[in-house]
């Protein structure tokens, strides 16, 4: 291969994919800056390790919640803006359960059920944590998933089902209505204050080249629960008849219908799986970050959308991978830009992917 | 369809008549409610001024959104971001230059307000361009996600400490971070009247109005006159959009909404048309934001939460996307019933029962209901938190509308891209032309549905 050939190929690439080239230059510059920081000792390896771990945790939450969004996006064909409030609803239901079990007899039941609204009970005072109150946490996880399933089925039955055959934008607008109704109903019940939910969990300190990276019990819990559920979804979709029906439905609705797959059954299964994962993701998110407010799900939703689009709508592996990329971007961006813009950086990554590869990293292959 | 046409045709004055009729009805309801409560004239005038203000801003915003969604089919849910950019740029350009020891933490460039407003609109339009370039070629739902992400990025940027203050042309300026900016310059009304040389005449008019309002009439008169000014802006927006919609440019926009591929095949560079329409709408949103927030005297980033975007969408959907008259009506109905209505109701309740202390939380509100079947604390809490419940109600209204009346009040009058009417001719002669028009009608519907499920 001669130099001329390499040159002409390079030139063709530069003309055909200008965005990709600019992107590559930016990535090289950022990496160069990082390496310079490491070489001069401005940036420590341990700092990067901490950020990567933080991004990984964030990415697991986003990925877990993103699976449900991606599935409804491809099977029901609309962007569900109420998904973020399913996350919050799951989190509140789960945490009410956890508070109730952990604090029974030590505080007023009403205050416990309202997750300490108005500063009536504090999670830290109750000593809530995976190791200190394991039963309460496990019960919370189960309830959060169950409640989110019930909520998403109820909303689907009453609100989305009557307009199932409308176009995607009609459903999208309706879902925005659902989102606002749910969010402010939760604010009405639980109040607008952000409350601390957990006691400081015990943590491991790992020595990493030039410093320590702390990994606490809740990180491990999140890692185990999220990867377990992701594996479960994988097995369900690949090995069961229901999974095959769902994949067929996402791929080609008409073809699935004439092979005798019941649309409504698949839709119900989608809400059950997606809703359950979403509720658990909401619970785990709060367990991991230790605070709970009525806006949490909405703020996470935009990152989840970024992840789902990044991975390719309809692909659950895309949602997981996209979640990890978005989580890592949001966390690692503080190496280069002020932390106030970390969310913006995640959106920029999404926009870049929309420009370079609009169908997403996993090319939008339906639910597989 | 014909029944509704008859209804609007029977109102004298057509569209303008309908708008005036609805506005008069709304004002009458507010005045009657005020009378029942024994409001003074000052109170009445104040509530009318506030109502007019919100009718004005929501009508302007839904007209601008109608250009995006109703005409061009661009699903913009980042309205509040364009408003925020308009307001902040206006503030930076217009605020007086920084003086150490003054009340304001940061200054501005100290230019006249009209320069600031133009700069704000230009900045909103440029932001629109930046958003539109990557997103317009993609599906409608991608544009939705990109625009709402943009509006949140804008809010977080204004919140951030890094942009709290910086140097611009040697002046200390900034966005003020979370505590926001003081807009310490003459409000639009004063600037306009001073510019026209009418300021002293206006002050004389204010003095004369002491006959009606004996003490300190200026705030009341200011509010009323500013409300009228806003209605003037609504009329200007309406005229501009009507002209745009009827121009060849507007016909291309409608063609894009109905079937972009066809418009493309006819040799129209649809990307360019969409970007122009998007930028124009964004500039108008910026202007509406400026007219909304500059008179308030201060601005904080957290005003620009996505809920404002949601308000404008509800206003447009109530009125009917695709119809300018519908947009104005939707803005008015939304402002009067859904936005100001519950707040007015809350004021009424507190005016009737002044000495009620409502429970501070849901727990205290619900426990008497469960234990003693005493609903009073719960009702008090409901009234007290009406600003949250208002959003719940709006969400339910939006769902109801999408279920039962997605075309809104006047959306059935959505203008088609064609210059000639597409409806079936009145004559019974069934010739080739008749057949043609039927097919075109059907094609429009199919295209509108197919456009979203494309790809």
Image (cartoon, rainbow, N blue to C red):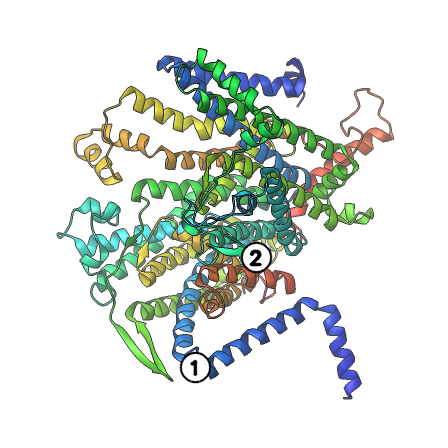
Image vertical order of residue B87 relative to residue B188, above or below? below
Q: Is residue A25 left or right of residue B107?
A: right
Q: Tell which subunit mark 2 falls on.
A: A
Crowdedness near tag 1: few (<14), some (14–19) or many (≥20) residues, C-alpha within 10 Å:
few
Residue B385 position within the rendered picture, expressed as x and y whole percent measured from the top left: 33, 35
Tell me, yes or no, if residue A164 can be seen here.
no
Of residues B442 and A306, the one nearer the viewer is: A306
The x, y position of residue B438, in whole percent, is 77, 32
Seen in the image, is A81 located left or right of residue B285? left
Q: What residue appears at the point 76 percent right and 27 percent down from the top-left corner? A: B423
Q: Read off the residue under disc 2.
A: A250
Q: Which residue is mark 1?
A: A41
Q: Position of residue B209 (x, y in %)?
A: 48, 14
- Asked if residue B300 lies left or right of residue B147, the reply is left
**Res. B297 in view:** yes
Q: Is residue A110 above or below residue B10?
A: below
Q: Residue furthest front?
A: B100
In the foreground, A314 or A44: A44
Q: How many marks?
A: 2
């Amino acid at each position: 291969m001669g130099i001329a050939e390499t040159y002409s190929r390079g030139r063709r690439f530069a003309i055909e994919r200008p965005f990709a080239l600019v992107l590559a230059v930016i990535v090289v510059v950022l990496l160069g800056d990082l390496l310079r920081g490491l070489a001069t000792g401005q940036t420590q390896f341990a700092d990067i390790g901490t950020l990567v771990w933080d991004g990984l945790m964030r990415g697991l939450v986003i990925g877990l919640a993103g699976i449900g969004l991606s599935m409804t996006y491809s099977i029901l064909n609309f962007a569900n803006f109420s998904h973020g409030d399913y996350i919050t609803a799951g989190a509140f239901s789960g945490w009410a359960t956890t508070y109730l079990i952990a604090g029974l007899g030590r505080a007023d039941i009403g205050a416990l059920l309202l997750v300490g609204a108005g500063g009536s009970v504090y999670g830290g005072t109750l000593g809530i944590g995976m190791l200190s109150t394991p039963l309460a946490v496990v019960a919370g996880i189960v309830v959060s998933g169950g409640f989110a399933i019930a909520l998403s089925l109820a909303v689907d039955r009453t609100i989305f089902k009557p307009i199932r055959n409308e176009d995607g934008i009609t459903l999208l607008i309706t879902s925005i209505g659902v989102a606002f109704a749910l969010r402010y109903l939760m604010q009405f019940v639980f109040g607008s204050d952000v409350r601390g939910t957990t006691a400081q969990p015990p943590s491991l300190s790992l020595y990493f080249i030039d410093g320590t990276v702390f990994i606490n019990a809740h990180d491990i819990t999140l890692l185990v629960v999220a990867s377990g559920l992701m594996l479960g979804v994988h097995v369900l979709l690949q090995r069961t008849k229901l999974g095959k029906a769902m994949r067929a439905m996402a791929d080609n609705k008409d073809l699935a219908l004439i092979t005798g797959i019941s649309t409504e059954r698949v839709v119900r299964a989608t809400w059950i799986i997606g809703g359950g994962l979403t509720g658990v993701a909401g619970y785990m998110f709060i367990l991991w970050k230790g605070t709970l407010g009525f806006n949490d799900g909405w703020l996470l939703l935009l990152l989840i959308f970024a992840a789902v689009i990044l991975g390719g709508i309809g692909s659950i592996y895309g949602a997981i991978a996209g979640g990890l990329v978005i989580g890592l971007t949001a966390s690692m961006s503080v190496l280069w830009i002020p932390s106030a813009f970390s969310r913006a950086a995640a959106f920029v990554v999404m926009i870049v992917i929309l420009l370079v590869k609009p169908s997403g990293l996993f090319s939008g292959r339906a639910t597989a | 369809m014909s029944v509704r046409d008859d209804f609007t045709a029977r109102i004298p004055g057509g569209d303008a008549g309908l708008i005036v009729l609805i506005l008069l009805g709304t004002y009458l309801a507010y005045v009657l409610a005020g009378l029942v409560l024994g409001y003074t004239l000052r109170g009445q005038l104040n509530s009318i001024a506030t109502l007019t203000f919100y009718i004005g801003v929501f009508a302007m915003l839904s007209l601008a959104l109608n250009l995006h969604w109703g005409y061009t089919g661009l699903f913009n849910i980042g309205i509040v971001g364009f408003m925020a950019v308009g307001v902040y740029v206006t503030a930076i350009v217009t605020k007086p230059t920084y003086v150490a020891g003054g009340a304001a933490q940061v200054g501005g460039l100290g230019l006249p307000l009209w320069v600031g407003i133009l700069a704000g609109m230009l900045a909103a339009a440029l932001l629109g361009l930046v958003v539109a370039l990557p997103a317009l070629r993609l599906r409608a739902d991608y544009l939705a996600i990109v625009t709402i992400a943009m509006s949140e990025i804008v809010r977080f940027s204004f919140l951030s400490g890094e942009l709290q203050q910086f140097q611009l042309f040697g002046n200390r300026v900034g966005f003020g971070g979370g505590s926001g900016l003081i807009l310490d310059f003459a409000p639009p009304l004063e600037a306009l009247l001073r510019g026209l040389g009418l300021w002293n005449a206006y002050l004389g008019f204010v003095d004369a109005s002491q006959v009606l309002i004996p003490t300190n009439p200026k705030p009341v008169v200011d509010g009323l006159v500013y409300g009228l000014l806003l209605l003037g802006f609504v009329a200007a927006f309406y005229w501009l959009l009507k002209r745009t919609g009827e121009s060849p440019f507007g016909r291309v926009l409608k063609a894009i909404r109905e079937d972009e591929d066809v418009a493309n095949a006819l040799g129209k560079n649809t990307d360019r048309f969409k970007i122009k329409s998007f930028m124009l709408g964004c500039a108008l949103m910026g202007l509406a934001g400026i007219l909304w927030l500059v008179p308030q005297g201060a601005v904080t980033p957290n005003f620009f939460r996505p809920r404002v975007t949601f308000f404008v969408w509800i206003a447009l959907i109530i009125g009917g996307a695709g119809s300018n008259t519908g947009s104005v009506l939707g803005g008015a109905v939304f402002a009067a019933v859904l936005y100001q209505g519950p707040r007015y109701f809350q004021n009424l309740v507190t005016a009737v029962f002044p000495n009620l202390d409502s429970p501070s939380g849901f727990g205290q509100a619900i426990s008497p209901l469960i234990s003693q079947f005493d609903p009073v604390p719960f009702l008090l809490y409901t009234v007290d938190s009406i600003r949250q419940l208002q959003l719940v109600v709006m969400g339910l209204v939006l769902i109801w509308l999408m279920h039962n009346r997605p075309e809104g009040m006047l959306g059935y009058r959505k203008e088609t891209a064609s210059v000639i009417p597409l409806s079936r001719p009145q004559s019974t002669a069934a010739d080739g032309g008749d057949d043609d028009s039927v097919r075109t009608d059907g094609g429009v519907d199919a295209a509108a549905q197919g456009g979203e499920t494309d790809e």
